[in-house]
Image: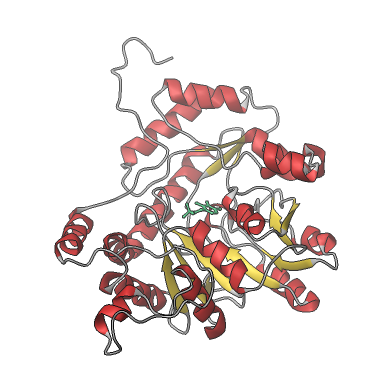
Amino acid sequence: MPNADTPALPFLPFARPDIGDAEVNAVAEAMRSGWVTTGPQTRTFEQAFTDYLGGGVDSLAVNSATAGLHLALEALGIGPGDEVIAPTLTFTATTEVVRYLGADPVLVDVDPVTLNMDPALVRAAITPRTKAIMPVHYGGLACDMDAILAIAKEHGLKVVEDAAHALPTTWKGTLVGQLASDVTVFSFYANKTITTGEGGMAVTRDPELAKRMRVMRLHGMNRDAFDRFTSKTPAWYYEVVAPGFKYNMTDVAAAMGVQQLARLPAFVERRQYLAQRYHAGLKHLPLVLPAEAPAGDVHAWHLYVIRLAPGARLSRDALVQGLSDRGIGTSVHYVPLHRHPYWRDRYALTPAMFPEADAAYQAMVSIPLFTAMADADQDRVIAALDQLLG
Ligand SMILES: *Cc1c(COP(=O)(O)O)cnc(C)c1O
């Protein structure tokens, strides 16, 4: 508990979006424009996103990364009887979309250092039913994409990257979104490195996949409302070519996204700075600090996940409580999928099948890391950890 003589400090959340006047004004303008659903702001955001990645890809704005992942697997023809390999240490969205299509996720364990899916285990999990691999760049650190893409090529498998944490992340100097996978999906959920409230972006260099995802994003219609509103072909005419979904992004959200993307370079710099400060401030404690990107590569630092070292004097739960008592918010990324009733029961999964992810789960805490936190906020976190563990 805080000492009686310490004034209560405001609660420090584990994450908070960084939204300024530019976003507020852009959203107000979109609302006043008379065009609030998918339209000019969405087009601008998609083009800006493609430009940010360096061009040569199609960027499709969607109303969540989950929607983008679903569209990607659907466009790749994943269906009943197929298997898709994914890590157990992820959010359930990664694999729920596999079930939407009647296919089965096959979970694999992670590397104990990076907490990313272990390519050797991916290879071992391949069966005649395997159709795709879904790497998740955990916390913003790239998976070993050379190994994963080589395995995919060798076995004729598709690759859909869950890049919800990976804006911007590089692998051997190339931005995630520009690697040789089929589709890469980013998230703009409230706590991600940029936010549109809810939203996501599906990125592909394959025009056929882009075309299918574009149609399925909006009811399987071959023209969207903005196209019908602005083109010379009669506005009322469209054709439905498939039973599509309702996954389009609104212009209200996209207006926010355009402004957030413009601020991304400054956000990245702030996250790098805060991560380095945590490294320096915590290295003397009995903690396993998160792995850094290899020299020359970019870690997005969406999350800063510390793990209690063996022999630390507190349990994970006691550490979470101790930080909470000191007004510091935390989270755990993630309760691994193999521990959730749905996945555990459906596929008869046990912790012993995923020793690395399970051990990491029991020792891990995500501590506050967001661009709007002050250095003094971070000093509080470091001092609290020092008090609890030093
Ligand atoms: C946030 C997240 C998602 C889902 O993103 P939404 O935009 O909320 O749908 C998927 N996978 C991972 C790993 C995430 O962290």
Residue 309: percent from the left, percent from the top?
A: 66, 34
Pick the residue in front: 250 or 291. 250
Quadrant assignment for the N terminus: top left
Residue at point 85%, 64% (across, down) = 127
In this view of the protein, which residue sits in the foreground, 30 or 326? 30
Q: Is 358 situated left or right of 269 in this image?
A: right
Q: Residue furthest top?
A: 4
Considering depth in this image, is 298 or 284 the residue closer to the camera? 298
State whether residue 390 appears in this view.
no
Q: Residue at x 61, y 23 (%)?
A: 314
- Image quarter of residue 29: bottom left
**Where does the image place residue 166, in percent across and percent down from the top left?**
50, 61
Look at the image and tell me in which quarter the C terminus lies.
top right
Above or below, 1 against 95 in this view is above
Residue placed furthest toward the bottom: 232
User: In the picture, residue 360 is in which quadrant?
Assistant: top right
> Which residue shows up at 25% across the image and 82% down it?
230
Q: Is residue 129 visible?
A: yes
Q: Position of residue 9 (x, y in %)?
A: 30, 24
Give the colour scheme of this rendering: secondary structure
Of residues 355 and 304, the one drawn nearer to the viewer in this rendering? 355
Give left or right: position of 256 versus 125.
Answer: left
Tell me residue 34's x, y (percent).
17, 66
Q: Residue at x 68, y 68 (%)?
A: 78
> Is 249 on the left-hand or right-hand side of 304?
left
Tell me if residue 172 comes above or below residue 287 in the rendering.
below
- Number of marks: 0
Compared across the picture, whether 318 is left or right of 108 comes to: left
